Amino acid sequence: MLNKKIESTKTETKKIRLGELTEEYIAFKKKHWALSTYNKNLGFYKRHIQPYTEHDFYVCKLTLNDIQCIIDRVQYDKGLARNTIINIKSLIGSVLNYGYDEYDIEFVKSFDRVFIKEELPKELPIINSDETPKLIEDMRSNINELYADAVEVQILTGMRIGELRALTEDDWFDNKLRINKSIERKTNVFSKPKNIQSIRTIDSSDRINEIFERRIKLNHFLFGDEANLILSLIHISEPTRL
């Protein structure tokens, strides 16, 4: 009788819909993902799965065709970029794996056969190092000084824009730059870097020192003693979430 009751419970557990399992998986991963990754995947779900019929399909009955319909909708009907399509497929695959690990729900074994069309390579403009000074000067003239300084430091250091925005005066010392945090683009919230390799200390240079000295002087003039970020595109108080 006990075994029958356990089997009955398992059967009921397996009757979980794709939308329910996706929401549960995203909620589970929220504490492990960077905020930007969480928002990205939540957006994929709300825009490309939740509004459509597949949202209510039982995971245990999903077919290859059902998943292909989701992918075809974003790659043909909506015409999204290939990398975005790959990310959406990856989210669905992760959700199905989560369902198998947590609830022993068998999923489409031929998931790898979901088709994603090839994308023609785009010809990106190539900027030679000789053209960089003119590019920076054009930005100073046509956009503003802060953006030009930010781009120049990025070119000199290879830093991500979120890492650059999060640099404080304490992170610039002994002709070094300490990179151990980032600012989320949409929320302006401080967060940890994407991975352990992103935490690093790099060399500064005379040109970077010149830019930072000028920016710090201007920041204190504009924001007073509360100014602590060197190259943020907006003024944010001292980081409270790391």
Image (cartoon, helix red, strand yellow):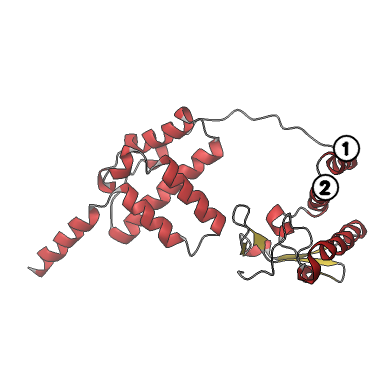
Say which of 164 and 83 sits in front.
164
Compared to residue 68, the image places residue 15 above or below, namely below
State the image coordinates of residue 121 (x, y, percent, origin top left): 64, 30
> How far apart are the two marked residues, 1 and 2, measured between alpha carbons?
14 Å
Q: Residue at x 65, y 59 (%)?
A: 183
Q: Residues within 10 Å of mark 2 (few under 14, many from 20)?
A: some
State the image coordinates of residue 153 (x, y, percent, origin top left): 82, 53
Image-quadrant location for residue 35: bottom right
Task: Give the quadrant of the N terminus.
Answer: bottom left
Compared to residue 39, the image places residue 110 above or below, namely above
Q: Residue furthest left?
A: 1
Image-quadrant location for residue 12: bottom left
Numbered circle sitting on residue 92: none
Q: Residues within 10 Å of mark 1 (few under 14, many from 20)?
A: few
| Residue 189 can be seen in this image | yes
Compared to residue 34, the image places residue 152 above or below, namely above
Image-quadrant location for residue 26: bottom left
Say which of 2 and 33 sits in front.
33
Q: Residue at x 70, y 29 (%)?
A: 123
Q: Is residue 95 left or right of residue 171?
A: left
Secondary structure of residue under mark 1? helix
Task: Give the quadrant of the C terminus.
Answer: bottom right
State the image coordinates of residue 158 (x, y, percent, origin top left): 76, 52
Amino acid bearing label 1: Glu
Numbered circle sitting on residue 131: 1
Q: Residue at x 42, y 45 (%)?
A: 46
Numbered circle sitting on residue 148: 2
